[in-house]
Amino acid sequence: MTTGDVGALLDCHSQPLTDANLEDLTKSASEEEEETQQVVDQSGLTLERLAKLCNLAKELKEGSREWEQRYGSFCAILQQGRRSHESLQDAL
């Protein structure tokens, strides 16, 4: 730690105390916990968010079924083409 660092710390703490700073310093622990809880509630899982997740999961499930059907049809077409190709090769 240098003399400049010490001076910066002293300057930082020598600023006048504002009403907002005083309120923050005098808050009780329960008030701070309430603020923390509100932040957690805003970012946590709610019924609305759970419903949205369930709807997204349902859409993904339906989409994957559609892709699976297309994939099955595509494979059937490829097999049919392969059989036709093999039949032509056998005929030659």
Image (cartoon, grey):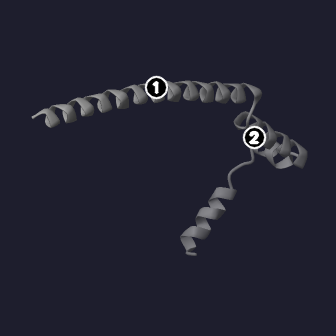
User: Which of the two residues, 50 or 79, is positioned nearer the viewer here?
Assistant: 79
Check disc 1 and give the amino acid type: Gln
Residue position marked by numbered label 1 in the rendering: 69
Residue 85 percent across, percent down from the top left: 19, 32
* Secondary element at image label 1: helix
User: Which of the two residues, 41 or 45, is positioned nearer the viewer here?
Assistant: 45
- Which corner quadrant holds the N terminus? bottom right
The circle drawn on residue 40 is: 2
Q: CA distance from mark 2 to mark 1?
A: 43 Å
* Secondary element at image label 2: helix
Residue 15 percent across, percent down from the top left: 68, 52
- Residue appearing at x 77%, y 36% in the figure: 41
Q: Quadrant of residue 18?
A: top right
Check disc 2 and give the amino acid type: Val
User: Which of the two residues, 15 or 34, is positioned nearer the viewer here?
Assistant: 34
- Residue appearing at x 74%, y 38% in the figure: 39
- Residue appearing at x 54%, y 69% in the figure: 4
Is disc 1 surrounded by few (<14), some (14 to 19) or many (20+) residues within 10 Å? few
Is there CB contact under 8 Å for labels 2 and 1?
no
In the displayed structure, 77 sits above or below 44; it is above
- Which corner quadrant holds the C terminus? top left
In the image: residue 14, left or right of residue 73 = right
Residue 27 percent across, percent down from the top left: 86, 45
In the displayed structure, 19 sits above or below 54; it is below
Q: Nearer the viewer, mark 2 or mark 1?
A: 1
In the displayed structure, 9 sits above or below 80; it is below
